[in-house]
Amino acid sequence: MNERRRMLVGGIAFVATCCYWWQRERRIRESLIASREWAANTAGEIDREGLRAAEAAAERLDARVEDLPQRIATLDEERRDLRREVSTARERWADALWHARFSRENDGGRSFDDGTVRTIEFERGELADARALAKRASDEAGVTLIAAHGDGSFAVAVGETTTDEFSATDIADDLADEVGGGAGGNERLAAGGGATGALSEGCQRIQDHLLQSDTFSSREAPASES
C-alpha cells in the first residue's frame, strides 16, 4: 500500500508542470503545495494531511485518488494543446495586423515596407503580442520596433537583408538602456521587459538614431504607427 501511495505522491508532484488556465490552474497548484509536504515524509508513513490533500485534489479534478496520475497527464496534454492553439491564433493575428497596416492596397499603391525603420505601439499589448508581431516583422526588410504599453515590454525585429548592418539584440539592448529593464534574443529577433521609462519616447530616439545611419539616411523615414 505504501508503494502505491508513493506512486500517487509522484503523480501529484507532477501538478507543478500542469499550469492550467485561470481557475483550474490555481486549484491544481493548491493541491501541489499539499502534495509536496506529503512527499517530504521519508519515514515510510504517509501523513494524514497529505492524504487529505490528495483526496481534495481528486475531488477538484473529478477523479479518484488512484486515477490522479492519469488525470494530471491528461490535463497537461490539454494545457499543451491550448498553448498551441493560442500561439497559432496569435501568429494569424500578427500576420493580419501587418497586412492591414503595411500592405500596398491599404496605402493607395505605396508600401510602407520600404526597408527603413518602423515603430508600432500597443496601448494594451503585452510581451507575447510584441514578440508575435516582431516574429512576423522579421520576414520583412528593415528594422521594426514594437512597444507594448500593457506590461512595459518591447520587441525588435531585423529583416534578413539588414542583419549585416544591425542586430536585433544590440538594438533591444540600446532600447533597454533608454527605458530601463532588460532584453535578449538573437540578431533577427529580440525582446525585453520591465521598462521604467517612457517607451514611446525611447523608441522614437532609437528610431531617429537608426535613421541617421548610412544604411537608412538616404531613405524616407516612415511615420510611427500607433
Image (cartoon, rainbow, N blue to C red):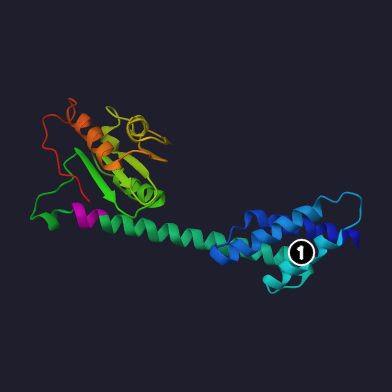
The residue located at (73%, 59%) in the rendering is 12
Q: Position of residue 108 (x, y in %)?
A: 7, 56
Q: Extreme top residue here? A: 214
SS of the residue under disc 1: helix
State which region is magenta.
Answer: 98-102
Residue denoted by label 1? 53
Asked if 187 appears above or below 102 in the picture, the reply is above
Question: 102 and 37: which one is in front?
Answer: 37
The kind of residue tagged 1 is: Ala
Which quadrant of the structure image shows residue 169?
top left
The residue located at (67%, 63%) in the rendering is 72
Q: Position of residue 202 (x, y in %)?
A: 28, 36
Asked if 129 appears above or below 168 in the picture, the reply is below
The residue located at (34%, 55%) in the rendering is 124
Residue 143 appears in view: no
The N terminus appears in which quarter of the rendering?
A: bottom right
Which quadrant of the structure image shows residue 175?
top left
Q: Position of residue 45 (x, y in %)?
A: 91, 56
Q: Position of residue 154 (x, y in %)?
A: 35, 43
